[in-house]
Amino acid sequence: MSKAGIIEGLRKAVLTYDIEGATKLAKKAVDSGINPIKAIEEGLVKGIRKVGKKFENKEIFLSELIMAAETMNRGLEILEVELKKRKSKRKTLGKVLIGTVAGDIHDLGKTIVAAMLVANGFEVIDLGVDVPTKVFVEKVKKFKPEILALSALLTTTLPMQKEVIEALEKAGLREKIKIIVGGAPVTPEWAKKIGADGYAADAKSAVEIAKKLVQS
């Protein structure tokens, strides 16, 4: 398979939710000496961008967007290891650290937001679910992202968003980062009350807010 064929294959794998194909092709890209940035941008990201547009236009279902995101992430895992080996950096709009707060294991909304952010040119580090406050603080110190996105899907875990912001203030990191909060029980009023920089009702608004925040 040619280098161009591998990159096109990565794009098609995301469009067809072919996780196994994306994994194999990402490994082939590395073995063939393809620049991992090119494989990510022209392969995986082009694919998720098209899927994201289809979702916005209501041409596909939510489950399909999630499968596409998972496919992209499998390929990214392999290619980002190669990026680090080469000490290369992707040119992005900014780095976003995202996670669901402690006590909450809901993954759906966060996964969609992460995929749409990648599709729109952001580098995303997904910490997963049930993330302790101290881990958010540690990872902000380590990765130095422009934006921290905090998800809470349960009313009982809403206070954890506030706790993370307060912990960042104590650590002297709050002024160095923009914070977006979201999740079913989150409101603009709550975001304002806890001192967040933005509130996102869905993935589309999360992308719009993130773009504004990195430009401000």
Image (cartoon, grey):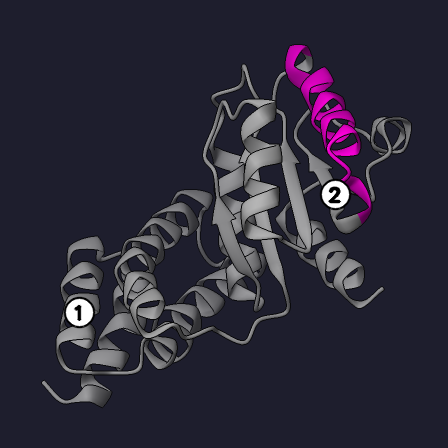
Residue that label 1 marks: 25
Q: Which mark is residue 126?
A: none
Q: What residue is pinned by disc 2? A: 179
Q: Position of residue 43 (x, y in %)?
A: 34, 75
- Disc 1 is placed on an element classified as helix
Q: Position of residue 97 (x, y in %)?
A: 57, 46
Q: Nearer the viewer, mark 1 or mark 2?
A: 2
At 54% from the left and 39% from the top, the residue drawn is: 110
Type of the residue with mark 2: Ile
When asked about the image quadrant of residue 101, the answer is top right
> How many other residues sit within 10 Å of disc 1, few (<14), some (14-19) or many (≥20)?
many
Point out residue 131 in the picture as x, y percentages from the top left corner: 52, 26
Question: Between residues 4 and 124, which one lies in front from this camera angle?
Answer: 124
Gap between marks 1 and 2 measured at Cα = 35 Å
Query: 10 Å neighbourhood of mark 2: few (<14), some, or many (≥20)?
Result: many
* 92 and 14: which is toward the camera: 92
The quadrant holding residue 14 is bottom left
Q: What residue is rendered at 67% in x and 27% in y?
A: 184
Residue at 34% from the left image edge and 63% from the top image edge: 80
**In the visual, does 91 lie left or right of 191?**
left
Q: Are marks 1 and 2 in contact (CB under 8 Å)?
A: no
Is-magenta flag for residue 160?
Answer: yes
Q: Which of 14 and 37 is in front in this view?
A: 37
The image quadrant where one finds the C terminus is bottom right
Looking at the rendering, in which quadrant would you find the N terminus?
Answer: bottom left
With 143 as the anchor, is 11 left or right in this view?
left
- What is the magenta range? 156-175
Number of numbered callouts drawn: 2
